[in-house]
Amino acid sequence: MHKPVAYSMRFWLGIALAVIVVDHLTKFWVSSSLDYQEFVPVLPFFSLVRVHNTGAAFSFLADAGGWQRWFFIAVGIVATVVIVRLLKRHTQEARLALPLALVLGGALGNVIDRAVLGYVVDFLYFHYQRFAWPAFNIADSAIFVGAVWLIWDSLTGKHEAKTAP
């Protein structure tokens, strides 16, 4: 008979930490390998480019004058507190805890950049003819995957059944 896996808070925080480590290793590699705004084609639709984003997604508020750094750090800290509380409450629900851990790791990866550097290092750049997606990083990818997963799961209504004792 199949025994259910017992997850711990430590396990989910470990996944978040893994996202942070991979995010910062790739940002360090890009920062030490490419000059600011250097563009390196990899595939016809994908390039590496080192850019510094002082705003949020799609450079939202990037030209706001500096206050946005502290605003986005505060938003990241609030998100961290909320996600950690949700993880504590749903530690055994992998369908909810895994995407939360991805969002947590991504959010903290970018908060660390903002706190230490004053900007987020972005470097993954997808483009095709006249279409170009704004550059992003591993932390952004983890946030996106986690958020889409949470939305999809809430829309499909496939939640783990809880039975009353």
Image (cartoon, rainbow, N blue to C red):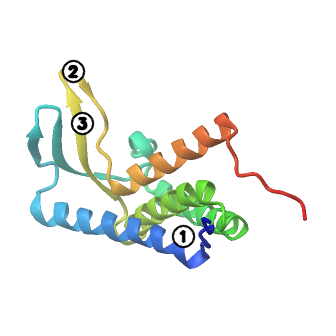
Instruction: State how far apart marks 1 and 3 are (Cα).
Output: 30 Å
6 left or right of 23? right
Q: Residue furthest front?
A: 1
On screen, 79 above or below 62? below
- Residue at the spot of label 3: 126
Q: Residue at x 42, y 61 (%)?
A: 110
Q: Residue at x 32, y 47 (%)?
A: 136
Q: Residue at x 47, y 66 (%)?
A: 108
Q: Are marks 2 and 1 in contact (CB under 8 Å)?
A: no
> Looking at this view, is 82 or 14 the one in front?
14
Q: Amino acid at mark 1?
A: Trp
Q: Which mark is residue 12?
A: 1
Q: Name the front one of labels 3 and 2.
A: 3
- Looking at the picture, how far across and down is residue 86, in whole percent? 69, 63
Q: Give the mark nearer the N terminus: 2 vs 1.
A: 1
Disc 3 from disc 2: Cα separation: 11 Å
Q: Which residue is mark 2?
A: 130
Residue at the top extreme of this rendering: 130
